[in-house]
Amino acid sequence: MAADEQVTLLDTWASSIGMRVRIALAEKGVKYEFIEQDLWNKSGLLLQMNPVHKKIPVLVHNGKPVCESLVIVQYIDEVWKDKAPLLPSDPYQRAQSRFWADFVDKKIYEHGRKIMTTKVEDQEAAGKKDFIDTLKLMEGELGDKPYFGGETLGYVDVALLPYCCWFYTYENILNFSLEADCPKLNAYCKRCLQKESVSKSLEDPKKIYDFALKLRKKLGVE
Amino acid sequence: MAEVKLYGFWPSPFSHRIIWALKLKGVEYEYIEEDLSNKSESLLKYNPVYKKTPVLVHGDKPIAESLVILEYIEETWPENPLLPKDPYERAMARFWIQYGVDTTAALGAFYHGRGEELEKAAKELLESLKILEEQGLGDKKFFGGESMNLVDISYGALGYLLAAVEEVKGVKVLEPSTLPRLHAWAKNLEELPVVKENMPAYDKLLAFVTGSMNRLAKN
């Protein structure tokens, strides 16, 4: 990276979508400044860098902001293209990667938000089974590959891996066991956490659960 | 060159997006109309996850989700580029395409809304479109500048489809008085031959939206 290059990440430590950006930057070996945001009291910097959504994550590269986690990951992949490519080079394989990353957004990220804002006793009605079925579908898509990206970490892995530190929280709120219901996905998480780019970007699952409980209390669902 | 097939649904702007992109790239394709109340074996085979249109099949390889298909078309047929070359500009284009996902949801709420909910949905859609107009479109003729690009393609529904929904609901959102630049953009988009010649006839679409809304009201 050029000596005068400035990379800043506006993020919150527990954010699953912020973690995507952290993994991507780590895979590429990009040095950056992490600025923790208070979403209950948004900073002038955040409002200036993401005036449309006022949300994290925001990547600021040489003063220019990029918003939306998967847009940021694609940007990182294109700018730092000489190391650890995240998207494959073949257009059809790229389309499959985009499809499954979008699936993670639609089915896991969105449901994750629902889980967080729903009381424990209402989780069954709110689609607990669908959520577990979604995880099983991801398992099927992984198959026997070490990563969704094949032999190396790819775009879909970057989209999904943050949940590896959130699964403990979901297991407790939904009352299910990832190891029992989705053993392959469980093994995948353990395997990926061996990689420094992943372990350094994710947070301790128990700290996440503690955070989740506090947030749920604040939202009135716990 | 392997053959290209598009499984679509005639009133759906998600299908129109793909038609416009293929036409802009000069790609020959076979269009297969799907009856969504009686989905074909092919559709279920090619899109087992969502079972929806549009699905593009290139050779024997299926691609689902319209925005994913658009990026595939852009990369497979690079002539007449529909995304900027510069990574930052591409990220901005993708940001606004992604913003459209929220706009689609707001349009859906407007379509489903009744009474007070309709008023609230109309207000939220207007606010969403104001941001799009001010920060996305600005003073440009198209999101792509002088000519349409993937961002314009992704917002196609704001023209003819929104107009039909406004007419059925009896509430206007996109007007010259409220959203002058976006309103002008929609008119300019529909003047382009590729859009004009590849959108459903308005009265046919209106009848479809009316019928669809009546069916919803009965349930």
Image: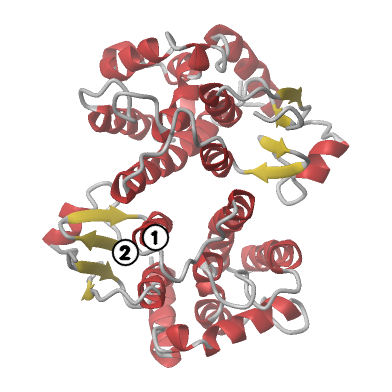
Quarter of the figure with residue A37? top right
Q: Quadrant of the N terminus of chain B?
A: bottom left
C-alpha separation, residue under disc 1 versus residue under disc 2: 6 Å
Q: Residue at x 71, y 66 (%)?
A: B123
The chain letter under disc 2 is: B
Residue matched to label 1: B66
Looking at the image, can residue B172 be seen?
A: no
- Say which quarter of the image contains residue A219: top right
Instruction: Tally the numbered discs.
Output: 2
Name the side, left or right, on which B186 lies relative to A100: right
**Amino acid carrying mark 1 in the image:** Ser
The one of B166 and A103 positioned closer to us in this rendering: A103
Q: On the picture, is B218 further left or further right than B36?
A: right
Identity of the residue drawn at 64% across and 72% down: B145
Q: Position of residue A35 (x, y in %)?
A: 76, 24
In the rendered image, which quarter contains the C terminus of chain B?
bottom left
- Lower sequence index among marks 1 and 2: 2
- Mark 2: amino acid: Pro
Q: Is residue B104 left or right of residue A39?
A: left
Q: Which mark is residue B54?
A: 2
The residue shown at (51%, 82%) is B160
Q: Is residue A66 visible?
A: yes
Q: Nearer the viewer, residue A23 or A207?
A: A23
